Image (spheres, rainbow, N blue to C red):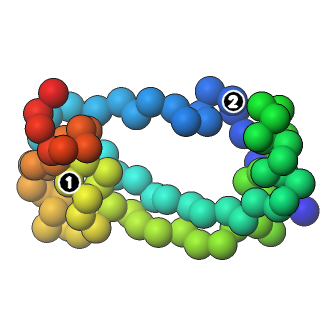
Amino acid sequence: MTEVPVPTSKISAQLTDPGRGEHLWTIITMHRVSNDMIRHLSRGAEPGPELLDHENLITLEGPGCFKCEQPYSRYLANRKCTGTMTLNGEQP
Ligand SMILES: [Zn+2]
């Protein structure tokens, strides 16, 4: 089993805008969580290193820009990002 420690500072962390016009490239991973782990987390307990182990990895999506919600392409990477960090697309 390969275990990756989960820094508690990364759980529900606030994202930082890299700047107006800059893309925020991301890759999203999805891990299957066991019933025991869900109960553990719902009690507010530390997730432990097994939360993000490779055996639980279901899928990996991306890369794409979090702000403009477009998949990566060399064309897009050479253009300014028109997205925002807000849910409604308004400039903060
Ligand atoms: Zn973007």
Q: Name the spot of residue 6 as percent of width and height, x first.
A: 72, 39
Q: Pointer 1 and pointer 2: residues touching (CB < 8 Å)?
A: no
Task: Tell me if the residue at label 2 has its CB under 8 Å from ligand 1.
Answer: no
Q: Name the spot of residue 82 as percent of width and height, x first.
A: 10, 49
Name the residue nearer the viewer: 68 or 73.
68
Q: Residue at x 79, y 51 (%)?
A: 38
Q: Residue at x 20, y 67 (%)?
A: 74
Alpha-carbon neighbours of circle 1 within 10 Å: few (<14), some, or many (≥20)?
Answer: some
The total number of labels drawn is 2
Quarter in which the N terminus is drawn:
bottom right
Residue at the spot of label 2: 8
Residue reaching furthest to the bottom: 58
**Residue 68, numbered label:** 1
Q: Is residue 62 above or below residue 7?
A: below
Task: Tell me if the residue at label 1 has its CB under 8 Å from ligand 1.
Answer: yes
Task: Say what secondary structure mark 2 lies in.
Answer: helix
Q: Report whether 75 appears left or right of 18.
A: left
Real-space Cα separation, disc 1 to disc 2, in angstroms: 27 Å
Name the residue nearer the viewer: 20 or 30.
30
Quarter in which the C terminus is drawn:
top left
Task: Tell me if residue 3 can be seen.
Answer: no
Task: Say what secondary structure mark 1 lies in.
Answer: loop
Q: Residue at x 20, y 54 (%)?
A: 68
Q: Residue at x 13, y 57 (%)?
A: 78
Q: Name the spot of residue 13 as percent of width and height, x first.
A: 52, 32
Badge 2 amino acid: Thr
Looking at the image, is mark 1 or mark 2 earlier in the sequence? 2
